[in-house]
Image (tube, helix red, strand yellow):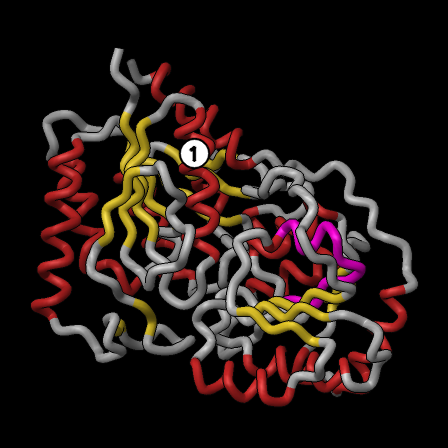
Amino acid sequence: MSWPKVFFYVQHLFGLGHLVRASRIAAAMTGSGIHVTVVWGGPPVEGFPPEGIDNIALPSVSAANANFTALVGASGKVVTQEFLAARRDLLLASLRGLSPDVVIIEAFPFGRRPMHFELLPLLEAISSSEKKPIVLASVRDILEPFPIEREQKTVSLVKNHFDGILVHGDPAFADFRDTFRLADQLSGKLIYTGFVAPSRPLSSAKRFNVVVSAGGGASAGTLVRLCLAAAKELSSELTWCVVTGPFLPDIDLQEIRSVAAVNVHIERFRQDFASLLAEADLSISRAGYNTVSDLLVTGCRAIVIPYEGVGAKEQYFRARRMQERRYATMLREDELTPSQLASVIKEQLSASKPKITSVNLKGADNTSALIHKFLCVNV
């Protein structure tokens, strides 16, 4: 008996959260007897997709800036229409070659508008295929807000092309309706999986008092500099590990290393990040999906400082929920000085650890089980 086949499309454009979440889901599916092929096309990140999982790397594109106004290739130059057409053709050829039982598309149609050039043709190819696979969207629980006209187009795409929407969250923490106003029109297709969080991590080889992180690192500079300045106002006996993220520009990394105190260890990326948190006294971070998932698993004391670039609200919504549930202390970057941050750090280091209760953190395994269920229903 052959394994069921899943074609899992994921595109990270500005950070690495989408790729990390998809990789965790792919690993869980592989462990349950599903043959997964991850089709991805962003900047490479060590360890993702994980070893042992088939993957197809499309020619790399990423967002030129946080406003997603253009796509750039590996060279940093804006890509041409010919480049995009070749990438689209490779994606469609990959679909034909794999002939999957299930297609999972990460984020789209609730995001990834810059990728319409290849995702709309992908949906059309699926619709016209002789053996039509099950089509599912894989989406986080909190979305960036967008105009009602875009929500209406999203609903239309879902109704015409998707069999289900896998919402990777717990409605007790954040209801999908909070950031997608037309969710009730999709109520028959919305399925909450729980957070796609890592398993309880093993202990890290080295322990730090404070762990600072900034997701993928594209917007890390201000946060990291703020933390380094605060560190100089606190005891030099505190040990710090600052994980800048792999996409922090080299010039910023060099400058940060040059001003860091001797008790501050700087790294670009740690695959054992959850293990660092499990051992740390305090985390200071953005409020991205994967970082919050790691915080919920480890129960580490946390200060969350959401990214709030032009129009960005998703991290603020998540950080606010963490504070409302007393899982973290939320601070706003544009209202914060190093001295104020240092004061909050001192308070948090002596505070009790948060009690994380009644949050579903089994999203990867639950997603895998749901894929099996879809396959059984559609036999």
Residue drawn at point x = 59 percent, y = 34 percent? 362
Which of the image's four quarters has the C terminus?
top left
Q: Is residue 333 found left or right of 326 in the rendered image?
A: left
Which residue is nearer to you in this view: 130 or 348? Answer: 348
Residue drawn at point x = 70 percent, y = 67 percent? 284
Please say whether residue 159 is visible from this viewpoint.
no
Tell which residue pokes out farthest to the top in this image. Answer: 1
Q: Residue 358: which quarter of the image?
A: top right
Residue drawn at point x = 27 percent, y = 37 percent? 7
The stretch in magenta equals: 274-285
Which residue is nearer to you in this view: 170 or 251? Answer: 251
Which of the image's four quarters has the N terminus?
top left
* Residue 264 within the segment the image draws in magenta: no
Q: Is residue 146 found left or right of 206 in the rendered image?
A: left
Q: How many marks?
A: 1
Q: Is residue 217 above or below residue 96?
A: below
Which type of secondary structure does the marked residue at label 1 adopt? Answer: loop
Q: Position of residue 290 (x, y in %)?
A: 56, 53
Q: Position of residue 332 (x, y in %)?
A: 69, 76
Q: Is residue 337 above or below residue 135?
A: below
Q: On the image, numbered disc 1 is attached to which residue?
A: 189
Which residue is nearer to you in this view: 113 or 352? Answer: 352
Q: Residue 286: which quarter of the image?
A: bottom right
Please say whether residue 129 is visible from this viewpoint.
yes
Residue drawn at point x = 57 percent, y = 74 percent? 308
Tell me which amino acid carries mark 1: Lys
Q: Is residue 288 found left or right of 226 in the rendered image?
A: left
Mark 1 neighbour class, 10 Å CA radius: few under 14, some 14 to 19, many 20 or more: some
Q: Position of residue 18 (x, y in %)?
A: 43, 54
* Residue 280 within the segment the image draws in magenta: yes
Which residue is nearer to you in this view: 48 or 337? Answer: 48
Q: Position of residue 256 (x, y in %)?
A: 58, 84
